[in-house]
Image: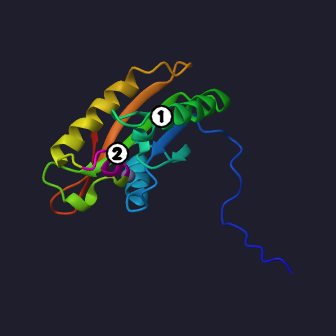
Amino acid sequence: MANIRLTRTSWNQERPHTLVIACSDGRLQENLDDFLEHGLGITHYDRLYAPGGGGALVSSGVELLRPDQYRRECRFLLAAHGIQDLYLIFHGPAEDGPEEAVCGDYRRKLPRATLAGLRQRQAQDADELKGVDWGTAVRVHTYRCEVTGDDRIQFVEL
Ligand SMILES: [Zn+2]
């Protein structure tokens, strides 16, 4: 006999018109949900989790093919789901935050960068993404989820 488990919630037929693109890093998912719900009032949203979050959609000066692929996926979702607000989330340490909080994808792309250099790269990447033609009249919001020196989490608009 099949093992079937019903969820406590039923299907919500209404499509969200918000897409959140965030890093796959599971250390921050609950904080992200918390910020979206209590900071922005967003509880119903489409998700695209990929290494780097917003960073998956930019080259950061090193990636050549991957950003094109992710931008295609993003454009598909924007059009197919009638997305009006696009949230591009980056993450990493705050200015006084710990090295361990660096996004693994950014560390992979820029293995020798300093923390300050990585933060600057993310800000540049966010700027680049705000200028992309997404093919629809979507509002683009960019944030970095930062871990502070005392292990607090803050979201900073980029
Ligand atoms: Zn990451």
Q: Earlier in the sequence, mark 1 or mark 2?
A: 1
In the displayed orientation, state which residue is furthest to the right.
Answer: 1
In the image, residue 147 sits, relative to residue 126, either above or below, namely below
Residue closer to the observer: 76 or 142: 76
Residue flagged by tag 2: what amino acid is it? Lys
- The answer to whether residue 126 of the structure is visible from this angle is yes
- State the mark number for residue 67: 1
Asked if ligand 1 lies within 8 A of label 2, the reply is no
In the displayed orientation, state which residue is furthest to the left.
Answer: 96
> In the rendered view, does 81 fall on the left or right side of 34?
right
Marks 1,2: beta carbons within 8 A:
no
* Residue located 39% across and 33% down the image: 59
Asked if ligand 1 lies within 8 A of label 1, the reply is no
Q: Secondary structure at mark 1?
A: helix
Q: Locate the N terminus by quadrant.
A: bottom right
Residue 155 location in percent, x, y?
29, 46
Residue 73 location in percent, x, y?
59, 35
Tell me the chief SS of the magenta region: helix
Residue highlighted by disc 2: 109
* Residue located 50% across and 23% down the image: 138
- State the mark number for residue 95: none
* Residue located 44% across and 53% down the image: 33
* Residue 45: quadrant of the picture: top right
Magenta highlight range? 105-111
Assess disc 2: are there few (<14), some (14-19) or many (≥20) residues with their C-alpha within 10 Å of its C-alpha.
some
Residue closer to the observer: 7 or 22: 22
**140 in the magenta segment:** no
**106 in the magenta segment:** yes
Residue closer to the observer: 27 or 138: 27
Residue flagged by tag 1: what amino acid is it? Pro
* Residue 110: quadrant of the picture: top left
- The answer to whether residue 158 of the structure is visible from this angle is no
